[in-house]
Image (spheres, rainbow, N blue to C red):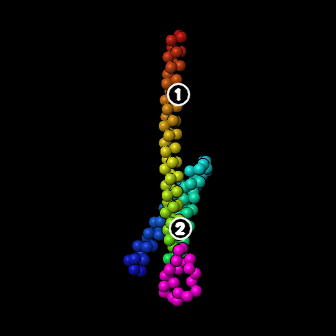
């Protein structure tokens, strides 16, 4: 194996591991609730996977096209790889957007939870003081 093949194989392995962990995270989030941001992240991951597949098909067709005889190939065949790259980048954009909004929402909910815990604690302290003053 050449160095180029080894680095390409390593890159694809890292990409598939990242997609696997992202997909596992989306499945975990989907068990709790499926809102608009979850669907945005899911559609982003689907577009990334489809984009990679289209890019690979387009590149293999490109190599096959220029290594063999160019007759008999459809005219749209040269557009598969660029469309795949476009789908890949659109998928990354959608996933990032959904993840960003989800993170802001989770942060806001965590802050609200802390406020409510502080409120409950102060109400408990106030009730203890009121009981002591009644005695």
Q: How many marks?
A: 2
Mark 1, other Cα within 10 Å: few <14 / some 14–19 / many ≥20 = few
Mark 2 or mark 1: which is in front? 2
Q: Which mark is residue 9?
A: none
Q: Nearer the viewer, residue 81 or 28?
A: 81
Q: Position of residue 21 (x, y in %)?
A: 51, 59
Task: Characterize the magenta stretch by its predominant secondary structure.
Answer: helix
Q: Specify start and end residues of the magenta stretch as a single range.
A: 61-80
Mark 2: give few (<14), some (14-19) or many (20+) Cα within 10 Å: many
Residue sitting at x 55%, y 55%? 41
User: Residue 93 in the image: x percent, y percent?
Assistant: 49, 58
The answer to whether residue 19 is visible is no
Residue drawn where x is 52% and y is 89% of the image: 69
Q: Is residue 130 above or below residue 49?
A: above
Residue 81: x, y in percent? 51, 73
Q: Is residue 47 visible?
A: yes
Residue 35 magenta = no
Tag 1 or tag 2, which sits nearer the N-term?
2
**Quadrant into which the N terminus falls:** bottom left
Which residue is at the front of the view, 53 or 19?
Answer: 53
**Residue 47 x/y as whole percent:** 55, 63
| Residues at discs 2 and 1 in contact (Cβ within 8 Å) | no
Which residue is at 52% across, 52% downward?
98
Residue farthest along the bottom direction in this orientation? 69
Q: Which residue does the image show at 47% across and 65% down from the upper left?
A: 15
Judged from the image, the secondary structure of the residue bearing numbered disc 1 is: helix
Q: Nearer the viewer, residue 94 or 119?
A: 94
Q: CA distance from mark 2 to mark 1?
A: 50 Å
Residue beneath label 1, please? Answer: 120
SS for callout 2: helix
Location of residue 120 with respect to 110 vertically, above or below:
above
Label ID, residue 51: 2
């Amino acid at each position: 194996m050449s160095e180029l093949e080894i680095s390409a194989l390593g890159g694809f392995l890292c990409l598939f591991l990242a997609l696997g962990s992202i997909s596992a995270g989306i499945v975990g989030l989907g068990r709790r609730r499926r809102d608009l941001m979850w669907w945005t992240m899911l559609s982003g991951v689907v577009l990334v996977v489809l984009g990679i597949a289209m890019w690979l098909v387009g590149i293999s067709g490109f190599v096959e096209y220029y290594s063999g005889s160019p007759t008999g190939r459809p005219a749209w065949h040269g557009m598969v790889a660029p469309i795949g790259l476009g789908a890949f980048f659109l998928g990354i954009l959608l996933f990032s957007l959904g993840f960003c909004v989800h993170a802001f929402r989770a942060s806001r909910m965590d802050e609200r939870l802390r406020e409510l815990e502080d409120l409950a604690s102060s109400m408990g302290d106030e009730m203890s003081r009121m009981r002591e003053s009644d005695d």
